[in-house]
Amino acid sequence: MPARFAVVDHDTPLLMPPDLREWVPEDHLVHFIMDAVSALDLRDAKVNDRGTGSRQYPPALMLGLLIYSYATGTFSSRQIERATYENVAVRLLCADLHPDHDSICTFRRTNGDLLKSSFEQVLAMAAQMRVLKLGQVTLAIDGTKILANASKHSAVSHARAVAQIELLEKQVGELLAKAEAADSTPLEDGLTLPEEISRRRDRLEQLRAASEVIKARAKERYQQELAQFQAKEQERAARAKASGKKPGGRPPQPPQVGPRDKDQFNFTDPESRIMKTPEGFGQSYNAQAAAEVESRLLVGVNVSDAPNDKEQLRPTLAAVIPLIESVEAVLVDSGFYSAGAVAAVEGSDEEKTGVLVYAATGRKPHGRTVQELEKRTDPPPLGPEASAKERMKNRLETKKGRELYALRKQTIEPIFGIIKETLGFRRFSLRGLKNVRTEWTLVTLAYNLKRLFHLGGATGQLAA
């Protein structure tokens, strides 16, 4: 008997209009996101209330489209528009409508308040589903570098800017002198003196503006570093007074006044910075997140232009949603640790906040020694003469400290891995710190909904 094949007929039209729901499985992520968005209060959405112009796409459609696209690794507004034609799940979500890329990008850029509100409402749903704990929670906080929508080759250092300003001023002077000389040698074909002078003056204006921004940033950095220096000096003096001995170690060095030669300014996205990433140095932002360790849901997010995490503990904690009633412990790596940052979170000896920070005070090699594998008793508490760093190290060496800190690397670090590797989000599409924070909220909102979906969230629970 000859082989038999199914009939493939591209020419005969469908006799009945197709129901797209039949083409998407019932347990598909798109259904979950549509149900979740339908349960949100979208009054914070920016819409044209005047009724003028073309008909608008409903906020629920645009928000659901963005969340689903980010949850499935599509971030470009043009690619999202293309998916409304090519992706069956997206066509279902959009009810066979096709928002153009400009409408998608504008909605994403202008609806920061809506995304923040939706982020909080989704976590409220998680609490109703008894997935998210609200009281006495343990948070794991970390930061990751996300590339900016700008090339590091569009940046200029302060030293380079100063040198270029001097060179261009000299060249403009030479060209002006040449223009005044009646017998000056002509330029190459296609070049004119007015155009060359104008081009150099435009570049001079840009470099001078960049230099002023670098100086302003250096002044702000100096104030922060001066406060840290003074705090270290005070702590050192307090330890010397308590012990009656001269404190060991090198004394803290006062900060440098003014800009440094390697301070950068980027012309494409001036608020981004050159930062060290696992792949090398890149034009980036520092994205922060706080995860509740039991559910692995993100409950607070922020973005900073600081290249390190030393000053990010308190701002990230401040970004945790008000729904979280109380925080018992905060887990951070050594990049976040400073005596001042811990004191700001835990409060003073006279007035404690009830929050305990568990922070590594230095880098540890991978793997565990034989001594670390052995069962051991808690170290004795330290006296008042001990430094803040010594007390933190002592806290992490207790059994509770070791068990809690072990939760950090198995919660927040895998979340960043999922966002970067599974979702594929490694570069912001928007520019500027405000817009980047909006986009990071969208990324983490998509992560949270996808996490709830995989935790088995049901439609009935979402609607409750």
Image (spheres, helix red, strand yellow):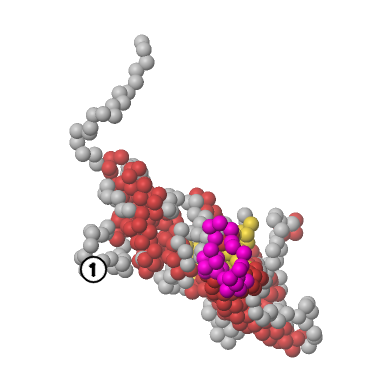
Residue 185 in the magenta stretch? The answer is: yes
In which image quadrant can residue 438 be found?
bottom left
- Residue 345, horizontal then vertical, whole percent: 55, 77
Q: Residue at x 35, y 44 (%)?
A: 87
352 lies left or right of 120: right
Residue 287 horizontal/vertical position (percent): 52, 64
State yes or no: residue 230 in magenta. Answer: no
In the structure shown, which secondary structural element does the residue marked by tag 1 occupy? loop
Is 376 left, or right, of 294 in this rendering?
Answer: right
441 left or right, relative to 7? right
View extreme (top): residue: 1
Residue 233 visible within the image: yes
Q: Position of residue 77 (x, y in %)?
A: 39, 54
Please name the residue that numbered disc 1 is placed on: 49
Of the pair 131 and 158, the residue shown nearer to us: 158
Q: Residues within 10 Å of mark 1 (few under 14, many from 20)?
A: few
Residue situated in front as seen by the camera: 303 or 83: 83
Judge whether residue 132 can be spotted in this image.
no
Vertical arrangement, residue 226 with respect to residue 207, above or below: below
Which residue occupies 42% across, 61% down? 442
Numbered label tally: 1
Q: Amino acid at mark 1?
A: Asp
> x and y percent of residue 299 in the render?
46, 65
Q: Quadrant of the N terminus?
A: top left
Is 248 situated above or below 132?
below
Residue 136 or 345: which is nearer the viewer? 345
Q: Which residues are magenta?
A: 174-200
Using the rendered view, name the quadrant where residue 359 is placed: bottom right
Tell me which residue sits at (74%, 57%) in the image: 369
Q: Residue at x 43, y 53 (%)?
A: 75
* Quarter of the figure with the C terminus: bottom left
